[in-house]
């Protein structure tokens, strides 16, 4: 409008056209500098983003975060005290996987402290997460919990038991549980081969094969053949026992 007014004052069609175009360009730059109201400005308050989600959506996130934190805490504390690296893994899951911002991460920290002070119900928390997440996300959650349990490089029996309970509470099948386990430990082909089996063998097959091989290769059976035979049998017996124990670990037994 200012460009048009100046053009009319100066006179001449060319001046009017040029000044109108100049006015449009200047007006656009003003809008870009947020001197005029915009949709972005409406979502800002004192320079900080304003959460425009409904109270129902915020309550749903609050509910989910509380139960998810409970699962992380139960896995982290399964082998003892919760350490700094475990807290880092939890934060990365919420920040990178779930895209939580600073305010939501503050909520996560609060729930973690609450659960540390007052142990939550693992079964209740797992059931709540099962209801919130599709199957694919539940597998990813279990995978993240495995990463948490392995942050110190070792998986204790108590941690494995807790992970199995979480998997069951999430409604995952035995095959799905084993697939996540195999991702972190491999499928144990070498260990099965030492028992003359494949990964498809049942638990009963594994136990039966171990007992038969352990009885066959026990060092006491060759004690009369001399020291060399006993040492060789001992090595074979140890391999069989280690293979069996590793398979049990892979299967969460």
Image: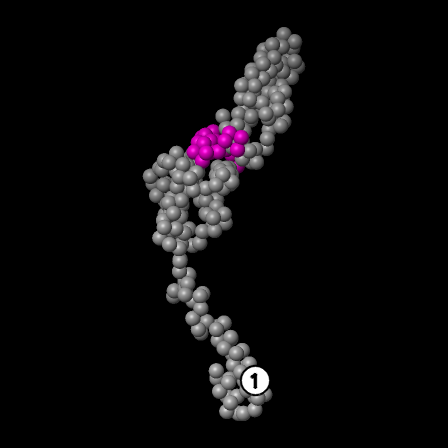
**Residue drawn at the location 47% of the way across and 29% of the way down:** 157
**Residue drawn at the location 53% of the way across and 25% of the way down:** 248
In-image side of 141 versus 222 (left or right) = left
In-image side of 64 versus 246 (left or right) = left
Neighbour class for label 1 at 10 Å: few (<14), some, many (≥20)? some
Q: Residue furthest front?
A: 13
The number of numbered discs placed on residues in the rendered structure image is 1
Q: Is residue 36 visible?
A: yes
Q: Residue furthest left?
A: 118
Q: Secondary structure at mark 1?
A: helix
Q: In the rendered structure, which segment of residues is drawn in magenta?
A: 152-176
**Residue 244's x, y, as percent?**
56, 22
Q: Nearer the viewer, residue 137 or 100?
A: 137
Colour mapping used in the image? one colour
**Residue 232's x, y, as percent?**
65, 17
**Residue 158's x, y, as percent?**
45, 30
Residue position marked by numbered label 1 in the rendering: 17
**Residue 57's x, y, as percent?**
39, 51
User: Residue 166 lies in magenta, yes or no?
Assistant: yes
**Residue drawn at the location 48% of the way across and 75% of the way down:** 30
Can you tell which quarter of the image residue 169 is in?
A: top left
In-image side of 146 versus 107 (left or right) = right
Q: Main secondary structure of the magenta part?
A: helix
The answer to whether 132 is drawn above or below residue 19 in the figure is above
The answer to whether 190 is drawn above or below residue 237 in the figure is below
Q: Is residue 71 visible?
A: no
**Residue drawn at the location 59% of the way across and 30% of the way down:** 187
The answer to whether 2 is drawn above or below residue 136 in the figure is below
User: Residue 155 lies in magenta, yes or no?
Assistant: yes
Can you tell which quarter of the image residue 14 is in?
A: bottom right
The answer to whether 147 is drawn above or below residue 36 in the figure is above
Q: Nearer the viewer, residue 141 or 82?
A: 141
């Amino acid at each position: 409008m200012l460009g048009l007014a100046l053009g009319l004052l100066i006179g001449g069609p060319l001046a009017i056209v040029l000044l109108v175009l100049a006015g449009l360009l200047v007006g656009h730059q003003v809008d870009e500098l947020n001197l005029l109201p915009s949709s972005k400005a409406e979502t800002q308050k004192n320079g900080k983003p304003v959460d425009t989600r409904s109270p129902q959506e915020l309550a749903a996130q609050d509910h989910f975060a509380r139960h998810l934190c409970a699962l992380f805490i139960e896995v982290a504390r399964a082998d003892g005290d919760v350490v700094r690296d475990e807290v880092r893994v939890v934060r990365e899951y919420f920040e990178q996987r779930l895209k939580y911002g600073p305010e939501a991460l503050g909520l996560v920290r609060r729930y973690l402290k609450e659960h540390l002070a007052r142990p939550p119900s693992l079964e209740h928390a797992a059931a709540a997460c099962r209801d919130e997440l599709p199957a694919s996300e539940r597998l990813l959650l279990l995978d993240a919990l495995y990463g948490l349990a392995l942050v110190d490089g070792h998986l204790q029996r108590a941690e494995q038991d807790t992970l199995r309970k979480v998997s069951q509470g999430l409604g995952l099948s035995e095959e799905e549980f084993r697939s996540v386990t195999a991702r972190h430990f491999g499928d144990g082909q070498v260990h099965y081969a030492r028992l003359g089996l494949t990964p498809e063998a049942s638990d009963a097959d594994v136990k039966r094969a171990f007992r038969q091989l352990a009885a066959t290769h026990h060092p006491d059976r060759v004690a009369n053949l001399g020291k060399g035979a006993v040492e060789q049998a001992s090595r074979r017996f140890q391999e069989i026992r280690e293979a069996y124990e590793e398979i049990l670990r892979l299967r969460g037994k």
